[in-house]
Structures are given as structure tokens and as C-alpha cells.
Amino acid sequence: MPIFTTLSSASARGFGLRGGAVRKKVPPSSVEYLLVSAGGGPGYQGGSGAGGYLSQTTSQIAGDIKYTVTIPAGGGGKGGNTIWSGGDINIFANGGGHGGTGVGGSGGGCHRDQDHGNGAGPAAGPGLGHSGGAGHHGQWGGSGGGGGAGAAGGGSRGGREDWDGGGDGGAGLQNAITGTQVWYAGGGGGGGQPCNQPLAAGGQGGGGHGGNNCAQASAAQANTGGGGGGGGGNAQSGNGGSGVLILAHTNGPDEPTVGAGLTYTKDASSRSGHTFYKFTQGTDTISW
């Protein structure tokens, strides 16, 4: 007849087993990150500036630490800051400045009553971008484009004090952390006046286009940190684009535990040999 034997917990430990113990997760030794804050939203006619942009690698990841992640929504006014912090990590970038007078990760473009662009965020500020473009002073002058992570916003065009077109938004920057080159943090196009002038383009990287007397400005693309387009004439300005945080590491380490307050996607196939996590909304913690 069969013989059944029950091991005590002490005997189990003697065989190298740990009763009730849970294996600790193995964090990655280094993590690449792309952090982009939200772009600026409606101001006064000028194109809004893009959110601050940071892209580096860190080896400061530790187990048993809850890292706070905050992804700001796009909207009006100055853009919110994207944040990743905890333990030895404290990473954030300035949100984009709103059109007209905004200072931020990148500056908002000047409205028609200003003749110079607002500067980008403070020189010591993280994610520093570029300034907004110049407006053209006059009752019906055009407004400057918002600054982008890669270039300043363009000045109003037309060469007259009246009936000017808006300036294009400044270009953002490309990043291939997901395995494909993608543009982020473009400035919003400035608002213009006449219907016969082309709408000011948003900068590459999700910036919204400007408006004029015959067309509304557009909002920036979500999760790019692009600046909203400036309204011109009777047009309303567009909202800024929401922020984003992408973390990537080589395959092997354990998957992090992500709080329910964060919206994210995991991708282990788009970039050879790597897994990345794209956080697009909310605030909560992640840990290994």
C-alpha cells in the first residue's frame, strides 16, 4: 500500500524550500525613459508652447520602493508636469506655456499686441525647450507660434500690421524608445486674421494648428505634449496635448506592479530585445 509522508516546515527548509515565502521581484539594472509634460492650452491668440521633454537612462531603480507616476491631462492654461519620483529618482519636466504670455517647458507665441516671443522655461528648469515666436503689432496683426522641444516658434507672417497670418509652431524632437521614431513636444501654430492666409501649422510632435476668422484652431495630439493652436479673429484656441512617460529595459527583469490609478500599455514585441511600458493617464505608484 502507498506510504504518505508529510514534511514539517522545518524539514522543508532543510530541503531548500521556504514555506509561505514569496520570491522578490527582480528590478531592471537600468531603465531608459522618455518623459514629456503636457503642452500649454488656450491663452490669447498666440500658439501654445510644448511641454518639457527629457530622455535619458537611469540605473537608480531599486526593489521594494513605490515610485509615484503622474501624467497630466491636456487642457487650458499652462500645461501640467509629468512626474516620476521615489527613492533616488526625482524626474519631472515643466509643462508648456500658454499662448500670448505663457512661460513653461517651451514658451507660448506672442499675441498680436506683442512684438517678441515669451522665453522658454527658466534656464535651470528641467526639460527646457524653446521660446515662442513674435507677433505683429496691430489691430488685426497675426500671432507667433508656440515653441517646441526642438525649435522656436515662428513669427507671424504677412508683413503688415493688419491682416497677418499666424506663425508656425516650433518642431519637437524624435525619439525611438518604442522601436519606431516618433515625434513629441511640437509647438502650437499661432492665430491669424485673414481667411486667405493659410492656417499656421502646428510643430511636428503633436502641435495644434492655428485658427483665423474662418477656421477654428485645433487641439494638440494626446500624449505628445504638443502645444494647442492659437485662435485668431473669432476662433477659439485649442487645448494642449497630455503628457506621457515611457519606460524601457532589456527583456528579463520582472514586470512592475502598477497601481490602478494609472492607464498604461505593455509592449514586449515592437522593439527587439526590449520591453516598454507607456503611461498615458492618471497618477499612482509603480514598484518592482
Image (cartoon, grey):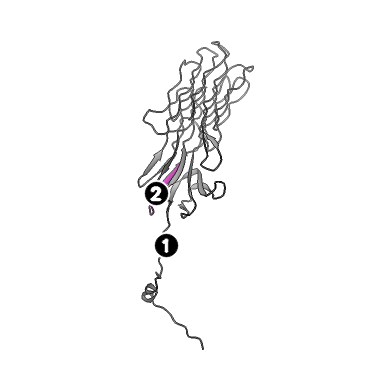
Q: Nearer the viewer, residue 40 or 77?
A: 40
Going by the image, does 237 lie left or right of 116?
Answer: right
Residue 33 at x, y = what percent? 46, 42
**Residue 71, visible in the rendered structure:** no
Q: Nearer the viewer, residue 75 or 120?
A: 120
Q: Residue tagged by mark 2?
A: 61
Label 2, secondary structure: give it: loop
Residue 73 at x, y = what percent? 50, 38
Instruction: Give the magenta part as a residue range.
Output: 62-70
Label 2 sits on what residue type? Ile
Residue 97 at x, y = what percent? 46, 28
Residue 47 at x, y = what percent? 52, 24
Going by the image, does 20 lie left or right of 43?
Answer: left
Does 195 sit above or below residue 11? above
Mark 2 residue crowding within 10 angstroms, few (<14) / some (14–19) / many (20+): some
Q: Residue tagged by mark 1?
A: 23
- Residue 225 tag number: none
